[in-house]
Amino acid sequence: MYLPEVSSLEDHLLNIQAIVKDFRPDRIAIDSLSALSRTSTDKAFREFIIALTSFLKHQEITGMFTVTTTLLSGGTSDTEGNISPLTDTIILLRYVEMSGEMQRSLSVLKMRGSKHDSSIRGFTINDKGINIGKPFIGVSGILTGIPIRS
């Protein structure tokens, strides 16, 4: 684990490349790109993402990156505009208030080359893992944070 403020983006990239070459993983997760984006300019961050994703694709490694928002129930992220064109899949996880309680929702916003399910679904996490629920049917406005039953 590396704290973003400790090194430059170039140093982070070199560290990631060295770790990947040593361990040869099939997948890599970076939590969170938002923290890395705060350590540089937008241009430098975009160049870092291009270099990282190119390296991972060349190594045939699946990359999963998280990006946080400033609002509990979602909103625009720091890096969304910068990395969306570079990604193959974007999955949105967020909290929504439904009937007076906080629930988690999941939706696939983008899956390049695939006709994916575009519904917004609830999900839960328990001791057995993640459970994807049925689509929120008859409710609109979930992604705006103001769900309304239709």
Image (tube, rainbow, N blue to C red):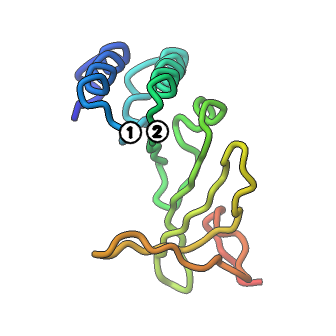
Query: Which residue occupies 47% across, 43% down?
Result: 67
Instruction: Give the foreground label among 1 and 2.
Output: 1
Q: Amino acid at mark 2?
A: Thr
To which quarter of the image does residue 34 belong?
Answer: top left
In the picture of the structure, the residue carrying the numbered disc 2 is 62
Q: Secondary structure at mark 1?
A: loop
Distance from label 1 to label 2 (Cα)? 6 Å
Along the line of sight, the residue nearer the viewer: 32 or 78? 32
- Residue 74: x and y in percent read 54, 56
Answer left or right for 20 relative to 6: right
Q: Residue at x 70, y 69 (%)?
A: 141
Residue 142: x and y in percent read 65, 69
Quadrant where the C terminus sits is bottom right
Q: Mark 1 Cα within 10 Å, few/some/many (few <14, many 20+)?
A: few
Q: If you read the primary sequence from the N terminus, does the residue marked by circle 1 or circle 2 appear first? A: 1
Q: Please state the horizontal and vertical placement of residue 3, each as a whole percent of the image.
A: 24, 31
Label pair 1/2, CB-CB below 8 angstroms: yes
Which residue is rendered at x = 56% and y = 80% of the image? 98
Question: In the displayed structure, does residue 97 sit left or right of residue 6?
Answer: right
SS for dot 2: strand
Quarter of the picture holding the N terminus = top left
Left or right: 150 in relation to 19: right
How many C-alpha atoms fall within 10 Å of the one at disc 2: few (<14), some, or many (≥20)? few
Question: With respect to residue 121, does 70 lie above or below?
Answer: above
* Amino acid identity at mark 1: Asp
Closer to us: 26 or 32: 26
| Residue at horizontal 54 percent and vertical 70 percent from the top | 96
Q: Which picture quadrant has residue 27?
A: top left
Q: Is residue 141 above or below residue 71?
A: below
Q: Is residue 76 above or below residue 101?
A: above
Would you name the residue on which mark 1 appears?
Answer: 26
